[in-house]
Amino acid sequence: MPRIMETEFRTLADHDEPHSVSILMPTHRAGTEIRQDPIRFKNLIRKGVEQLSRNGLREADAREKLDPLWPLVDDQPFWRRQSDGLAVYVDDRPHIYRVPVALDETVMVGRHFYLKPLFPLVHGDSRFYILALGQKSVRFFEASRFGIRSVELEEAPENLAAAIRLDGPEPHVEFHTGSQERGPGKGRPAMYHGHGDGLDDSDKKKWVAEYCHRVDAAVYKKIGDQRVPLVLAAAEPMLSIYRQANQYPGLGDHLLHGNYEQKSPKELHDSALDVVSDDFGAEHRAALKRYQRIAGTDRVATDVESILKAAGNRQIDTLFLAEDAECWGRLGDGQASIDIHDEPKSGDEDLLNAAALLTERGGGQVFVLPRTDVPGELDAAAMLRFSTSG
C-alpha cells in the first residue's frame, strides 16, 4: 500500500467516470484506537454502497463495486501498518494510499475523485528530494515535511566500484574522511588508498568525479528541471565533487556533511528537514505577492462559477483554496452548465474539488491552505494566465 506520488496523483486527477468512489478517513499508528479503525472503515464502505445506490446504480452493482474492500476490514496487518490517514479511490478497482496527515471521514460518489485534501501532500511546497551518496551506495528519496519514500534511480550505478567497472579494469579506490562533523572544513583531509594500482590522488578524484557525473545524470533524468529542493548527504570530498557535477537547479546549499550510508530513512529525513525548513512556504509566499500585484484586475477570479469556467479553459495559473471550504453542486460537460446548491443534494460534488482538478489538468498550481492564508480569507481565489477581456 504505497504513499501517493505525483505521477499517481496526476492519474487520479485525470479520472472522469461515473460512479467513482472516494473514501477518506483518519487512521492510527499505535494504541487502542487501531481497533476502531476497521470498524470506521466498514461503516464508510456501507455509506459508499448507499451513495452509489442513490446515484442510480443498482444495489447489487453497488455492492459488487465495493466488494474488494471488505477483506481489508479483517486484515489486521493492514491496520497495523497505517500512517495518519487512509485514502481509497475505487473505479474498476481500488487504489489505496496511506497518507501522513489525518483526514476527515468522507465518502463521495461522482465522476471525479475527491483529491482536494491531498493537494498539500503532493503539490505543497514542502516537497523535497534527498540524495544520500557514498562509496558503497546511492540512495534517493522523495520527501515532504510529513514523510519520506525511497525512489529507484534506474540508471545510477549501485556504488563507486560499479561505476568504475563500467569503464574497464577496476582499480581499488577508497577514501576516508575522518570526523563526520557538519559544516565546511570539518574533519581531516581525505586520504586515498590505491593498493598497488599506480594511481595518484588526481587519478582517483577523476574516478570519483565520473561516479558523481553518472549519479547526477540519473538524478536529472528522474526529476528533470524542477525547482523542488534536493538535499545532498555525503562526505567530503565526494560532496564537493558532486556539487561540481550537479546540473539540477534545486540543489543549491541544501547539504548534509558526513557519512550517511548507514543512516535510516527516518534519520535522513529528520536531518534534511533542518536543511530545507526555510524553503517551506516559499512558493506560496511568492504566489501571494504576484496575486497582490494584480488584485482588483480582470486577471483575478474569486467567485466559484468564474473560477470553474476559467479552470475548464486552462486559464488558471494559480488557485488558492481554503481547506475548510466546500461548495456543492453539479458541473455539466465542458462547464456548459454550473448549478450551485446551498446544501448537498444527491449527485452533487464539491465544486472546489472540481476546480482544483481542472486547474491541475491545465498545468496550473493549486494551494489548499488554512483560510487565513487565502487572499481575502475567501473560499477560493484564482490568478489567471491572461485577461478575461483580452
Image (cartoon, rainbow, N blue to C red):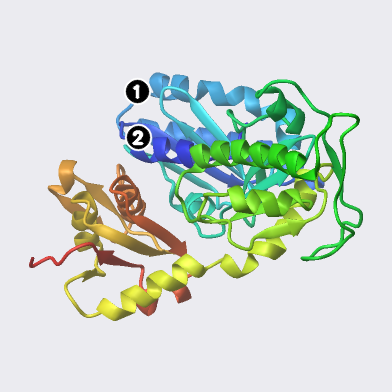
Q: Amino acid at mark 1?
A: Arg
Looking at the image, residue 75 lies above or below residue 32: above
In the depicted view, which residue is nearer to us: 262 or 345? 262
Q: Position of residue 384 (x, y in %)?
A: 23, 64
Q: Is residue 263 left or right of residue 359?
A: right
Q: Is residue 248 left or right of residue 269?
A: left
In the depicted view, which residue is nearer to us: 76 or 231? 231
Residue underneath mark 1: 58
Q: Amino acid at mark 2?
A: His
Residue underneath mark 2: 15
Helix, strand or loop at mark 2: loop
In the depicted view, which residue is nearer to us: 316 or 353? 316
| Residue at 71% across, 37% down | 207
In terms of image quadrants, where is residue 154? Answer: top right
In terms of image quadrants, where is residue 17? Answer: top left
Distance of label 2 from label 1 (alpha carbons): 22 Å
